[in-house]
Image (cartoon, rainbow, N blue to C red):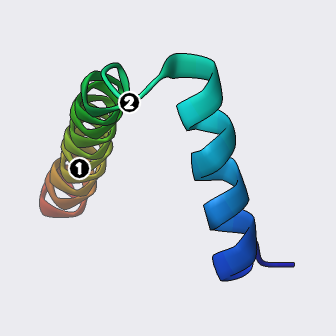
Amino acid sequence: MTIGVPGLILIILILLIIFGPKKLPELGQALGQTLKEFKKSTNDLTSDQDDQSKKTIDHQ
């Protein structure tokens, strides 16, 4: 089930009504930074697990 273009337009209009046009860029920036940190943390965890599995294989 996807949102589609009409759904995105409706969501943007609702956000404009609730927060106003001045606040939306700040919200977008905060959301972008949050996603960036989440991706970084996920990549760090994945690389840590890969490093541990390599160490385990080397010790065997």
| Of 44 and 5, the residue lying toward us | 5
Q: Position of residue 20 (x, y in %)?
A: 47, 23
Secondary element at image label 1: helix
Residue 55 to residue 34: above or below: below
Q: Amino acid at mark 2?
A: Pro
Look at 19% across and 41% down and name the residue there. 40
Number of residues whose C-alpha sits closer than 10 Å to that of mark 2, classed few (under 14), some (14–19) or many (20 or more): few
Image quadrant where one finds the C terminus: bottom left
Q: Is residue 11 left or right of residue 43?
A: right
Q: Amino acid at mark 1?
A: Asn
| Of 4 and 55, the residue lying toward us | 4
Decide which of tag 2 and tag 1 comes sooner along the chain.
Answer: 2
| Of 2 and 11, the residue lying toward us | 11
Look at 74% across and 67% down and name the residue there. 7
Q: Is residue 5 left or right of residue 27?
A: right
Q: Is residue 25 left or right of residue 11?
A: left
Q: Position of residue 34 (x, y in %)?
A: 31, 29
Number of residues whose C-alpha sits closer than 10 Å to that of mark 1, classed few (under 14), some (14–19) or many (20 or more): few
Q: CA distance from mark 2 to mark 1?
A: 34 Å
Q: Position of residue 21 (x, y in %)?
A: 38, 30
Q: Disc number at residue 43?
A: 1
Of labels 2 and 1, the one closer to you: 2
The residue that mark 2 highlights is 21
Residue 50 to residue 39: above or below: below
Q: Position of residue 1 (x, y in %)?
A: 87, 78
